Image (cartoon, rainbow, N blue to C red):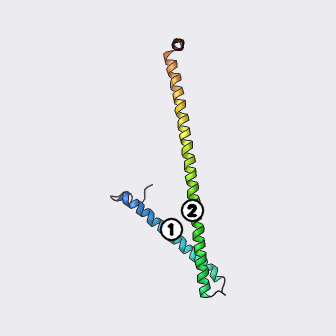
């Protein structure tokens, strides 16, 4: 699947830029969500002063972003592990398939040359 702007004359340069912009917009949306949640939390505590509410909001947003960062890093690490596992398994399956094809090719060659020549080959 191609990204918008990725197929044009500047597609090679636009791809990373589009990814960076998308990442920025996602981070900004996440930050805005965290601030909204903090504002909702502060609204349920009407006894807080404006300074206390702002302090609580700041701590909440920082903690939420740190938690999200940890979760994303764990997800990236797990994705890398899974990728390596799948690549190893794929290589193993390819080797097995190659061995089977080689065995079949040998069997076909032995059958094509006839079994009568096999004792002559083995006696040498």
Quadrant of res 96:
top right
Q: Along the polypeptide, which appears first: circle 1 or circle 2?
A: 1
Q: Nearer the viewer's eye, disc 1 or disc 2?
A: 2
Q: Quadrant of the N terminus?
A: bottom left
Residue under the point 60% across and 67% down = 67
Can residue 39 be seen in the rendering of this structure? Answer: no
Residue under the point 59% across and 63% down = 71
- What is the x, y in percent for residue 8? 35, 58
Relative to 57, say whether 19 is above or below: above
Which residue is labeled 2 in the image?
72
- Badge 2: residue crowd in 10 Å (few <14, some 14–19, many ≥20): few
Relative to 51, say whether 68 is above or below: above
Which residue is labeled 1 in the image?
26
Between residue 46 and residue 4, name the one nearer to us.
46
Quadrant of res 61:
bottom right
Residue under the point 57% across and 56% down = 77
């Amino acid at each position: 699947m191609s990204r918008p702007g990725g197929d044009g004359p500047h597609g090679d340069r636009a791809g990373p830029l589009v990814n960076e912009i998308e990442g920025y917009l996602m981070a900004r949306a996440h930050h805005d969500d965290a601030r909204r949640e903090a504002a909702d939390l502060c609204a349920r505590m009407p006894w807080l002063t404006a300074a206390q509410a702002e302090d609580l909001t700041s701590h909440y947003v920082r903690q939420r972003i740190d938690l999200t960062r940890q979760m994303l890093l764990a997800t990236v690490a797990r994705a890398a592990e899974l990728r390596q596992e799948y690549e190893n398994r794929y290589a193993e399956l390819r080797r097995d398939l190659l061995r089977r094809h080689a065995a079949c090719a040998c069997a076909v060659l032995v059958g094509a040359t006839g079994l009568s020549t096999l004792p002559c080959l083995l006696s040498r």
